[in-house]
Amino acid sequence: MRTRGWESGLWAGSGQMAASSSAPPARLLGMAREWRRRGHAEEARQLFEAAELVATTAGDGVNAARAAVGIAHTDYARTDLIAAEASFERAANTLLRVGETQQGLRAKISSAFIPLDAGNLDRASERLIALEVQTRRERLVAEHASVLGYQGNVARALGRWDEAHRFYEHAVLGLEAQGDFLYAATFSMDAAVTHLLAGRLAEAFDRLRHARRLAAATESDAYLEALLAHYQALATLLAYGSKEALRVETHAAGPDTAAVRFLGRVRELVGVLRGATGATRRRAIRSLDELEAERFPYEHGRISVLLARTLFGDGAPSVERLVVTRGRKTVSLDGAGEVDLADRPVLWRLVRTLVEQHRTHPGKALDPSILIAAGWDGESMLARAARNRLHVALATLRQLGLRTVIVRHPGGYLLRPGLEVLCVD
């Protein structure tokens, strides 16, 4: 059990209360929330579990559900996404059953966003769209604003910076108006991160300052404070470089969880890379590659690795993401802006064929004849003319931003092995 100094007495009282079946659920919940606010996930979870058990035994559905929400938040902080989603759903179903519609939808919203951390953007987007409609119909302003904020995170993951900012702006305004400063601070921070990814430093610092002001206006928690400090350090490095960053404390203290430790590892590498050269720099870059290869189930972890690469100018990430939007017929490589192929059917068919090959037979080249048949839909032409057309079409795609993606191979053409391809409707 992790306790320090003055905390030992607090935990002793909490432990006795948790062991007692007669302890009121509301008191157990209060103690659990205090431990979570201080960043002690393990202790908080034990108290939330005790509260849920006592409340369920007493037939107190509302407090049982509130305890389940607390368990979900602590599981999420520990990046146990499966357990967190299950607890949010359990809480939502209980709250909706006892008529607590507003709180039930809040739990549904939290559950809907978890798939994004797991990398399932389609599932997250589908659930959030449904909740946007439901919260608008129920006229739940704060909950609707939260859904918009999470939709901003989905847009950011797809590299749609401007769309993400529109969502964040509406979310922060709505949450501030309702006095929900904690979530308003969270989405203001998310807006700052998106500005950093887009290279808009002045706007990023402005949003971080606003997030800090909002966090100061409420009883913040250790996780948000750690994230704000983390991004402040990375933003300062990105904006001012090593000399100015020496005046910034880059160690953002936080709870002892896997997610916070992952962010700490990124900052440690940033510390090594400040002015590093030669073999030291190469080793640090390899370590950054290893962090990225872990595919840690935490969106802020992935963003931090990407920002670290941007800080030190080592080119595009070793794992790039190509987003293909089937409905609009657009492609985007790592948020560099969408390329519209709706009016260029040959190019669109070539991209679609290469993507399908990459998804079903990664690393295997397509014979030029297959691409010609797909691109020109079986049109009859001389072999030499067909090869020339294919050469020009692929050159055009490279000029449009896919230069590093389309690879020539002795067996034909393919998308670069290791490329992450995300297809959305």
Image (cartoon, rainbow, N blue to C red):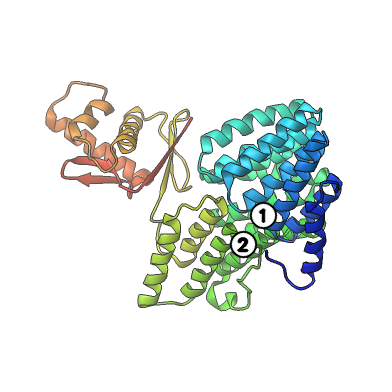
| Residue 191 appears in the picture as rendered | no
Relative depth, front residue between 251 and 399: 251
- Residue 255 appears at what percent x and percent y? 66, 62
Dot 2 falls on a residue whose secondary structure is helix
Q: Is residue 183 left or right of residue 295?
A: right
Q: Is residue 378 left or right of residue 168?
A: left
Relative depth, front residue between 265 and 413: 265
Q: Is residue 6 left or right of residue 295?
A: right
Relative depth, front residue between 36 and 380: 36
Residue at 57 percent of width and 71 percent of height = 240
Return the residue at label 1: 189
Give the residue type that dot 2 points to: Tyr
Q: Is residue 409 above or below residue 12?
A: above
Residue at 52 percent of width and 66 percent of height = 265
Relative depth, front residue between 293 and 50: 50
Q: Is residue 281 above or below residue 63?
A: below
- Badge 1: residue crowd in 10 Å (few <14, some 14–19, many ≥20): many
Residue at 48 percent of width and 30 percent of height = 425
- Residue 129 appears at what percent x and percent y? 63, 30
Q: Is residue 269 above or below residue 138?
A: below
- Mark 1 and mark 2 lie on one chain; the one further toward the N terminus is 1
Residue at 77 percent of width and 39 percent of height = 64
Dot 1 falls on a residue whose secondary structure is helix
Dot 1 and dot 2 residues touching (CB under 8 Å):
yes
Return the residue at label 2: 231
Whole-number angstrom distance, CA of label 1 to CA of label 2: 8 Å
| Residue 368 appears in the picture as rendered | yes
> How many numbered circles are shown?
2
Q: Quadrant of the N terminus?
A: bottom right
